[in-house]
Amino acid sequence: MIHPSAIVDPGARIGAGVSIGPFAVVGDDVVIGDGCSIGAHAVIHGPTRIGRDNRIHAHAVLGGDPQDKKFAGERTELVIGDGNVIREFCTLNRGTGNGGGVTRIGDDNWLLAYVHVAHDCRVGSHCIFSNNAALAGHVTIGDHVVLAGYTLIHQFCRIGDHAFTAMGAKINADVPPYVLVGGEYAVPRGINAEGLKRRGFDAGQIRAIRRAYRTLYGSGLPLAQAREALEQMATEHPVVAAMAAFLGQSERSLLR
C-alpha cells in the first residue's frame, strides 16, 4: 500500500496495513505503527515514533529539526501515540537536548490544518487544536483541551485538563484545568461548562468547579491562600483536586 512515487528510506520500519500516498517522504529512523495512513506529499523525518491508526494528511511535516538556535544536531525524537488525526500542513518538531529530547503527542487528538507544535512540547490525549493554533517550545497541554483557531501559546506555558481557549487567544501564562480563556491577550472568562457536560461531569461536579473558579478568581485571595482554599474544598469535592494540584506545580505565572 505504498504508492510507487513515495520515497521510503530503508531504515524506516513500516507496520502492517499502512498506506503511504503519492510523493510522500519517510526518512531514516522512522517507525510507523499498524493501520496508519500517510497522505500525499507528507514528510516524516526521523527519529520519529508513530503509533497505531493515525491519519496523517497531505503536506504535513513531522519530526523536523527543532527551531531552536541552541540545537546542535543531537539525537532527539518526536513520539506520537495512537488514533490521532493530523491534518494538512501541520508541523510537529522534534525535541532538543536541553529540553528533555522528546516532543510527545498522546492519543486520539485532532490537530487541524496548519497547527504547529514546537520542540519539547507535551500534548495529552483527546485534544482538539483548531486551524492555525500554535505552541511555542516546552508547552504542556493536558487532556481534553480545546484550542480554538489561531490560539498562540507562549513557551513554557501549561494548559490544564478540560481547558478551552477562544479564537485568537494569546496565552502567556498558565491556564488551570476547567477554565475558559479568551481575548487577544487572554484572560479568564469562566469555566468550560459546556465541555464538561459533554464529557459526563454531573451538575454537582460542575457546581463545585464553578465555586473553585470563583475562589481562585473572584475572592481577592492571594494565590497561596486560594490554593489552600481549593485543597480544603477538594476534601469534599475531589473534582477540585486537579485545580489545586495544578497551582502547586506552576513555574510560570498563573493567568489570573
Image: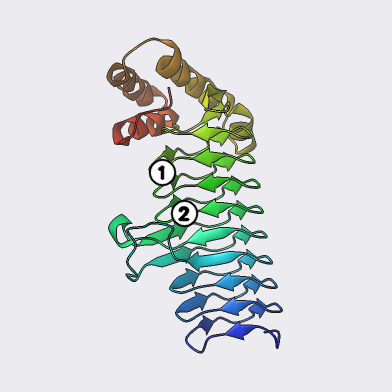
Decide: is 69 above or below 162. below
Who comes first in sequence, dot 2 or dot 1?
A: 2
Colour pattern: rainbow
Q: Residue furthest front?
A: 69
Q: Is residue 1 visible?
A: no
Work out which quarter of the rendered image holds the C terminus and state it.
top left
Q: Amino acid at mark 2?
A: Ala
Work out which quarter of the rendered image holds the N terminus and state it.
bottom right
In the image: residue 59, left or right of residue 185: right
- Tell me what residue is drawn at x 32 percent, y 70 percent: 74
Whether pointer 2 and pointer 1 mark residues with C-beta atoms closer than 8 Å, the reply is: yes
Element on which disc 2 rests: loop
- Tell me what residue is drawn at x 60 percent, y 78 percent: 25
Decide: is 208 above or below 55. above
- Find residue 140 and report its horizontal and vertical position in percent: 42, 46
Q: Residues within 10 Å of mark 2 (few under 14, many from 20)?
A: many
- Find residue 15 and report its horizontal and vertical position in percent: 56, 81
Decide: is 208 above or below 84. above
Q: Residue furthest top?
A: 220
The residue singled out by tag 2 in the image is: 118
**Whole-Å distance between the Cαs marked 2 and 1?**
9 Å
Number of the label disc, if any, that sits on residue 147: none
The residue singled out by tag 1 in the image is: 155
- Find residue 249 and report its horizontal and vertical position in percent: 30, 36
Q: Nearer the viewer, residue 5 or 216?
A: 5
- Find residue 33 and report its horizontal and vertical position in percent: 54, 74
Q: Amino acid at mark 1?
A: Gln
Q: Is residue 120 visible?
A: yes
